[in-house]
Image (tube, rainbow, N blue to C red):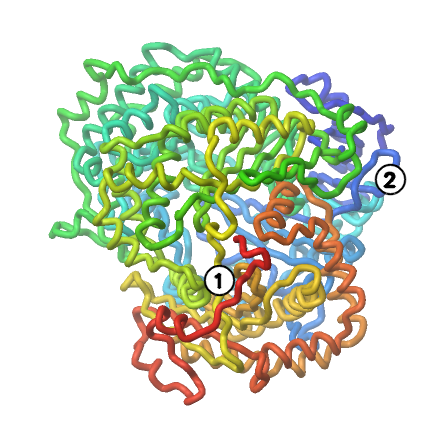
Amino acid sequence: LYHSVEEYEDTWIDDSQSKVDSLLRLGTINFSFVRLGCPKRLYKSFVDTDAKHNVEGLLDKCHSFPQSEQISLPRPPLPFLDIPLVPRPLLPLPREATIAEFSTTIPSPFVMVATRRSLYDSYLSKHGGSSNAYTETEYTCYHFEVKREFLNGALRRFSQFFISPLVKMEAMEREVLQSDACRLQQLQCHTSAHNHPLNRFFWGNKKSLVDAMEKGINLREQILKLYKDYYHGGLMKLVIIGGESLDVLESWVVELFGAVKKGPQANPVFTVESPIWKSGKVYKLEAVKDVHILDLLWTLPCLHQEYLKKPEDYLAHLLGHEGRGSLHSFLKTRGWATSLSAGVGDEGIYRSSIAYVFIVSIHLTDSGVEKIFDIIGFVYQYLKLLRQDSPQEWIFNELQNIGNMDFRFAEEQPQDDYAAELAENMHFYPPEHVIYGEYVYKTWDEQLLKQVLGFFVPENMRVDVVSKSFLKSEDFQYEPWFGSRYIEEDIPQNLMELWRNPPEIDASLHLPSKNEFIPSDFSIRTSDACVDDFANSTSPICIVDEALIKFWYKPDSTFKVPRASTYFRISMKGGYADLKSCVLSELFIHLLKDELNEITYQASVAKLETSVSYVGDMLELKVYGFNEKLPLLLSKFFSVSKSFIPTDDKFKVIKEDRKRALKNANMKPLSHATYLRLQVLCESFYDVDEKLHCLNDLFLDDLVAFIPELLSQLYVEGLCHGNLSKEEAISISNIFKMNFPVKPLPIELRHAELVICFPTDANLVRDASVKNKSDTNSVVELYFQIEQDFGMESMKLKALIDLFDEIVEEPFFNQLRTKEQLGYVVQCSPRVTYRVFGFCFCIQSSEYNPVYLQGRIDNFLNGLEVLLDGLDGDSFENYKNGLMAKLLEKDPSLTYESNRLWNQIVEKRYIFDMSEKEAEELRNISKHDVVEWYKTYLKPPSPKCRRLLIRVWGCNTDLKDAEALDQSVQVITDPVAFKKQSNSKDTLQSGEK
């Protein structure tokens, strides 16, 4: 049954069929070693055809991470399991939780807070794990993660959901209450052909399920029929990533999933002959936000069987390109668009076994929304260019090289993401390409590309426009489920004929140039690092410490991939000194990003990514990816930046885009609540409405006069981490110094954020209405301010906060969401605001007003002491061990490690082994410590219990209900006045931010 093991030390799966055949043999249980970056992964792939095992069709991927010095693997990560299941095509499914709610072999009810499914969730929570699920149009994915030694117990509970689900009506009724609507794409479904599978309500809400029950439809019977027809081994794919040996993992699968019923292994085949949408139509949808979006959609045949050729990706690469000669660059130059993307959508309605839907999505300016038909005309000019120049094999070769190198040196993913990815891939790729299928470009097929291009014609195009500019129309129709207002119009026939064969192609449109950022040197700097002083260091070391720049360096000795990360934070003179300076600085950063876009986009295609953001008075630049061309990109970036002066045309476009972004800020109640909390907490916080008012009065001359002063004095702190030598890192720091030979910005002129220290036993409330006046969701966020983070001195306090979160998260969710059904979002978590610890409890609900939600949170908090006191010793130790496992989990990738190190630098802690130090503190924490922490910081009338209650009132609630407050409550109506009366905490001991 078992094939002999042979390790391929430096082998990676490529498109060579012979190599794949040597690694995978179907019909038996085989071992294979595959190198994906570092560390090496051990895979076991099998289809068990032995009847005695009774796991027919359950194609399994077992990933073992044994602790072995011989292959130098880090400690095993958290085991993770993922099963996607294939239901009927495009069937509107009940929520995944309904199937996983009950099973006959798990006793019900359970003790304490764990009832029914809660026992499963509680088991995971106590052992450092969690679970989730999601549904697409053709499959559902269930998954969990848990600490290694408790994988078997979790699997025992999990497997029963698919062997003997009860599906009680109580679970169905609760399902009806907690599912809030998702409106995305529903208009496209509503306006599709009546006989097409898309023509239905996909997302499900209270109305859709209640209506079904009122019509006498037995939902439980429908769910059980779905389970009977599709939840069988033939359509199930199982992925387990664990630390046990492959033999052990396989034995668990046979034992625990052997009772899963059998079924045919072939996926259902669906054919639909009718087109999805009517030809020659444009649909104008009224937007909620202030946006203008043009979407062009073409229906293609399902191309999944052509994954070795990827014709849709070739076309997406060209139509979505952002370099010179591209549609994106052309439309931006004319001031009509701010962004453009292209490709087959990832959602199931766009990528299914029935059809692929290719989308070109363009975010328009105010002038662009007046030129929609002109823009469509230029899209068809570019399509004519692609036909006229014929498909280019050199472009395919570039994509092939990038795919090969991206796979060959792929970074480790978090195990939960990786398991989900493999489980989905097993439905779509043959076994030999489950891992490699999404990367591979094997066969150049010019004829296939020409055939696919043939579908990009006006008769096969749907046009959607999303905007607020249709408000004056009286010809609205209403989408029945969400009530969205839209207009359906005919496209003039003369335009359809013009687009079919444009008479000319604008000279500005052309194919992209060859990509200079594609690397060819993948050598590893191992030999350099071994003789270097930094070889065994787990922390970065400061290699440059000058008045202008402080630069940290750490070579990679763990992952051994040709990748590197280089991060900068550049403090600029007066960038956050006042409201006007803040708005001008933001304009400068966005205009600079726009100027550099053609360069950074080409690099991103070659997997060398760039991130530019604005933090306080600082420009933050992150460049990460393959290291060979990283210095080239940085040289180009700083060379452009040092002499950049924006033009009036670009200024107007970016100003308009920033105005739109400020108008759209806080449209979501959850983000609005966070904004209101930070507005109270942070001393230097500029209101979005004030920023918008200031922006309206700014012009190009203001910015041109501001830039030289902004860049006249700078201070930089940076990190270089990865496959680079010390000399290369110093050279990178010199790139900045050569381009910006300016005076250093002294520490007293650098912005330091201050956080307001709430008064003793503060009980503060801030109320606001939802910004979107049709949003029924209300949000309550209860924030407790704890103490300032003093680094090592605060390590025990941080461990207590994290352990409290580990213990309370599941009971809070279980009580207020699962049992009381208050809302879809019920969560609690620690907060660290500029080095000040806090803790938040949050609920979003469309059914209850904020006063009621606040009362339910308070009721839960009042019972916490009983819950904590009732924890037995074993349960408490399990929570500690689960948190310790998370803290001690190794970094999964070089980029993850870079971000962890960078966070310590920008927060000025410089405790690069903070997780290990927190784990050490955690070992000595007792249950008594947690109870005392709760009494001190979260339970009134403790003087250190300082509360800030944020309440965002939905459109279906009455803000007048906020007036009935206890006398001890201080209402914040003017955050600026409140902060002037309060004390501030300098969050950084050095005075820097």
Tell which of 768 and 319 is nearer to you: 768
| Residue 476, x across and y down, in percent | 17, 51
| Residue 917, x across and y down, in percent | 75, 57
What residue is shown at x 23% (from left), y 46% (from top)?
698
Task: Locate the N terminus by quadrant.
Answer: top right
| Residue 600, x across and y down, in percent | 45, 28
Q: Is residue 860 visible?
A: yes
User: What amino acid type is highlighted by mark number 2?
Assistant: Ser
| Residue at the disc numbered 1 | 754
Quarter assignment of residue 333: top left
Q: CA distance from mark 1 to mark 2?
A: 48 Å
Q: Is residue 933 left or right of residue 965?
A: right
Tell which of 307 and 914 is nearer to you: 914
Labels 1 & 2 near each other (Cβ < 8 A): no
Image height of 784 relative to 644, above or below: below
Query: Badge 1: how crowded within 10 Å, few (<14), some, or many (20+)?
Result: many
Q: Is residue 157 visible?
A: no
Query: Badge 2: how crowded within 10 Å, few (<14), some, or many (20+)?
Result: few
Image height of 985 relative to 276, above or below: below
Quarter assignment of residue 421: top right
Q: Secondary structure at mark 2?
A: loop
Q: Secondary structure at mark 1?
A: strand
Residue 902, label in figure = none
| Residue at the disc numbered 2 | 68
- Residue furthest out toward the bottom: 967
Q: Is residue 21 left or right of residue 840?
A: right
User: What amino acid type is highlighted by mark number 1?
Assistant: Leu
